[in-house]
Image (tube, helix red, strand yellow):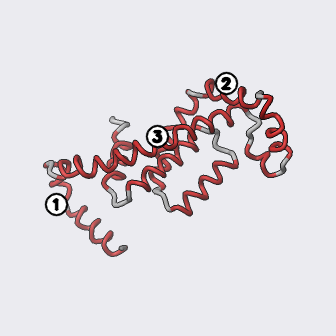
Amino acid sequence: MFPAIGPISKIIKLLHSEVKPWQLATGLCFGMVMGITPLVNLHNLFILFLCLVIAVNFGAVTLGLALFSIVGFIIDPLADKIGLSLLNDPALRDFWTRLYNTPTLTWTHFNNSIVLGSLVIALALFVPLWAATWFFVRFYRERIMAGMEKLKIMKVLKGSSLYQTYTKIRNWTE
């Protein structure tokens, strides 16, 4: 009946989790890069490796991937123009030739204008999105979350036996 309730409840769970704001922000940004760029590329495999090494929140990565996959399709014409201008720049021609002739680097698919352009767009958005997400998570947790906890519905949910069982199991795993 309300298809948006599932994703919204997952976002609220992420915001109420004990995950640090930088982990949520970094996960969302990594998901954004993977979502905006075509998925099967070497740089996305590298980002997945970074997600494991840095210990970002995979829920945030999944959220970023889902949200920005839609954005990726919308900005494909712009990405194509940016990629074509970079690939056709005479000053960069030798660089692209060397990159394409390097065996492993051909898997980056940077000779594809949409892949190159969308990666440039994603990298340009990375720092502003990271900062905005980090500030939003902190603001939410410091100013809004306490008010949400005072709502009657939250008190009823926390008083339920299901929530009590959940907290017991969560405390065992910590």
Q: Quadrant of residue 76?
A: top right
Q: Secondary structure at mark 1?
A: helix
Report helix, strand or loop for mark 3. Answer: helix
> Which label's residue is closer to the chain start, 3 or 1?
3
User: Crowding at label 1, few (<14), some or many (≥20) Cα neighbours within 10 Å?
Assistant: few
- Quadrant placement of the C terminus: bottom left
The residue wearing badge 1 is 159
Marker disc for residue 171: none
Dot 1 amino acid type = Gly
* Residue under numbered circle 2: 81
The numbered mark, 2 or 3, whose residue comes first in the sequence reads 2
Read off the residue under disc 3.
Answer: 128
In this view, the residue in front, 91 or 53, is 91
x then y, percent, for residue 132: 40, 42
The front one of 62 and 29 is 29
Position of the N terminus by quadrant: top left
User: At 64% across and 39% down in the image, what residue appears?
Assistant: 38
- Please name the residue shown 20% across and 55% down the image: 157
- The residue type indicated by label 3 comes to Pro
